[in-house]
Image: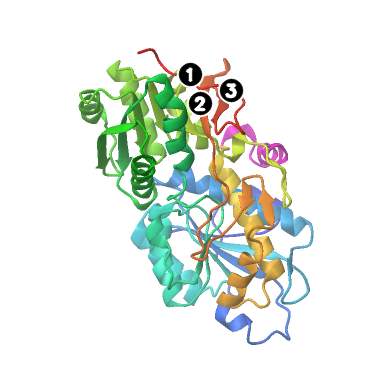
Amino acid sequence: MKASVFGGLAALALAAGIMTVADGARAQGNMGGDMGSVPKEIVIGDLYASTGPFASISMPVYDGLKLWVAETNEEGGAYVKAYDRKIPLRIVSYDDQSNTATAATLTNQLITQDKVDVLVADSGSVLASVSVPVAREHKVFLIDPTGTGSPLFSKDNPYIALVADPASVIWPKYLADFLTDEAAKEGLTRVAILYSTNDFTGTQASALKGFIEASHSPVKIVFYRGVPTSTSDYTVMINTIAATHPDMVIELGYVGNDIAFLRNLQDSGLKFRGVFSIYSGSEPEVLVKNVGASGLAGVFTYSPSNFMHYKPTAGMDVDQFRALWDKTYPGGKVAFGLNSDAGYVTGLAIGQMLANAPDLTALGLRKGIFAASGKMTTLAGPFSLNELGEQTGELMPIGQLAPDGQNAVKLTVVYPPEDADGKAVFGPK
């Protein structure tokens, strides 16, 4: 278990090191009680995974959040409405090493021992899921960067907000419409859905199936099966899918699942008219490194913020952020993609929360974050929360990848029509 403290641009150079967590900070429940004394800093408690199956999605989020904190401190800190002034930020962070039991223990430590002002869950639904009940038990408001699974949210839990990814139940809406409006017209009517059994991709698979069935489209689901998230060999499953003669294969998993599936698909020599995976577009640098640009040729995927060009009302646009990212993390050692953007957007959401919260109690922070709903656009798109705290903005169009000739990939947005800059290309019948 590692602990780190960061604040300011110079501290980013220490990201690989280990520092002792300092004493101090105040619990959310205590800050609202004494508004007379101005704290010298606002402490953000955060978890990350430097190793294990979720490191590839966790570390970019962590690094993106650190970058936002450093940038904000360079400008004197974040404006805190409760004290009507800017206050410097500090991150107290722990490495859960992709272990859910460790993540739960460390969440409790951030709340009860470090008494952080702002609590941030680790990336993804699996690791975030264990922080939700701990935060709820202690009545501490939880910032959830990318844990999108439906079980994380409920009507009786006001202590959570998803800030940097849309809820899993709405992720595949454009995908379902694309299958009906575009793929089916080209004769792709038989669809196979293979998903990893976790809150994130399991919810997506169920939602996609529901969207297709409710639309009464000509699309027929000929294969629908879940496999453990730990699956690393898809050879048998690919052959099982091929026996159902699908036109389109949709694989929903985390980064490691996508890598294993696409590698095994290449090795099998099997060809389908269309293939979809999530992280081919979300983390293209990691996928190219492990699968190769040729292995991503023609793959359909979500078009995340790193390929889109929204006009933000808060923070940098994607080109400005990419330039700062490359300057801060030179040499491509830290992958740039959806999750790096998500870390930065998490910071922007925290900034808006502090700027709008009447006090720093849990429900005060909730008021602060909801005040930004429908009123902020970031490099990830429009920011919008429903009553459960789920993100309903930041929807991602459907794109298709192609090698760019320089051992990387380019993405063409193919759906919906109003966002498209090209046409989908399907394999031969």
Q: Position of residue 252 (x, y in %)?
A: 37, 39
48 or 135, nearer to the observer: 135
Residue 270 located left or right of residue 164:
left
The three-letter amino acid code for the residue at tag 3 is: Gly
Question: Which secondary structure is most common in the magenta stretch?
Answer: helix
**Residue where numbered disc 3 is placed:** 422
49 or 226, nearer to the observer: 226
Marks 3 and 2, how far apart in space? 9 Å
Q: Residues within 10 Å of mark 1 (few under 14, many from 20)?
A: some
Q: Position of residue 167 (x, y in %)?
A: 47, 52
**Residue where numbered disc 1 is placed:** 425
Marks 3 and 1, how far apart in space? 9 Å
Q: Are marks 3 and 2 in contact (CB under 8 Å)?
A: yes
Residue 392 located left or right of residue 187:
right
- Disc on the earlier residue, 3 or 2: 2
Discs 3/2, front: 3
User: Per the image, is 327 magenta?
Assistant: yes
**Residue where numbered disc 2 is placed:** 400
Residue 385 seen in the figure: yes
Q: Secondary structure at mark 1?
A: loop
Tell me which segment is drawn in magenta: 318-333
User: Per the image, is 235 magenta?
Assistant: no
Numbered badge on residue 16 = none
Q: Secondary structure at mark 2?
A: strand
Q: Are marks 2 and 1 in contact (CB under 8 Å)?
A: yes
What number of labels is visible?
3
The three-letter amino acid code for the residue at tag 2 is: Gln
419 or 383, nearer to the observer: 419
Q: Is residue 298 above or below residue 259?
A: above
